[in-house]
Image: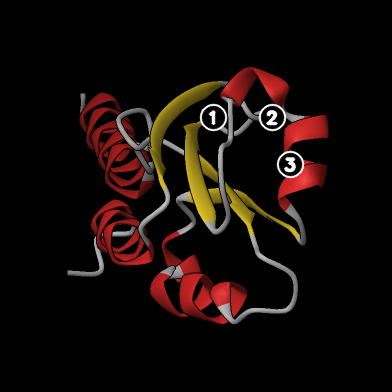
Amino acid sequence: MKGNLVLFLTAIIIFSLLVGCATDNGDEKMYSVLVVQNGDDNTDEIITDAIDVSTGRFHEIKFLMSLEDAQKTYPEYEIEKAPAVLIFETGGAVLTMLEFKTYNLEEAVTKLKQLSNYE
């Protein structure tokens, strides 16, 4: 009888430890960011300063140096001018669903800080 009780309590303790140590990232979204610069402007510095990469919420941050490259590579997103910031919900995969697009760097910084739970 004591043996069964000890076994039962041990199983409960192990189960509690496993449940307590498990991470639940199921609700956390992952994002990829596409930044279109206007040549050698400082857009890359502004954006990288805004993103808290320690959160692990950003799968990829890609910088394109010209509007022409962006329009050629991603015609489906109809990028009209630079600088431009496009944020995609990825779920950890490649660019999938466009969630946010702006040509305003202040708006981009606000959104990126919000997504990285930085504010």
Q: Which of marks 1 and 3 is nearer the N terminus?
A: 3
Give left or right: position of 15 versus 60.
Answer: left
Q: Quadrant of the N terminus?
A: top left
Of residues 11 and 95, the one nearer the viewer is 95
Judge whether 114 appears above or below 39 on screen. Answer: above
Going from N to C along the chain, the mark reached first, 3 or 2, is: 3
Relative horizontal placement of residue 108, taking residue 13 as reference (left or right): right
- Whether residues under marks 1 and 3 lie with C-beta atoms below 8 angstroms apart, the answer is no
**Label 3 crowd (10 A; few <14 / some 14-19 / many >=20):** many
Q: Where is residue 40 in the image (x, y as percent from the top left)?
A: 73, 78
Instruction: Give the residue type at disc 1.
Output: Thr
Observer-side mark, 1 or 3, equals 3
Say which quarter of the image contains residue 82: bottom right
Q: Nearer the viewer, residue 1 or 91?
A: 91
Q: Against 33, is 11 above or below?
A: above
Per the model, the C-alpha gap separating discs 3 and 2 is 16 Å
The crowd level at tag 2 (other Cα within 10 Å; few <14, some 14-19, many 20+) is few
> Circle 1 is placed at which residue position?
90
Please name the amino acid that badge 3 sits on: Ala
State the SS at label 2. Answer: loop
**SS of the residue under disc 1:** loop
Q: Height in image: 69 above or below 47?
A: above
* In this rendering, position of residue 1 left or right of residue 115: left
Task: Find residue 102 and name its label.
Answer: none
The disc at residue 70 is 3
Between marks 1 and 3, how big is the CA–CA gap?
19 Å
- Foreground: 19 or 50? 50
User: Which residue corresponds to mark 2?
Assistant: 94
Is the residue under label 2 in contact with that under label 3 (CB below 8 Å)? no
Q: Residue at x 42, y 51 (%)?
A: 103
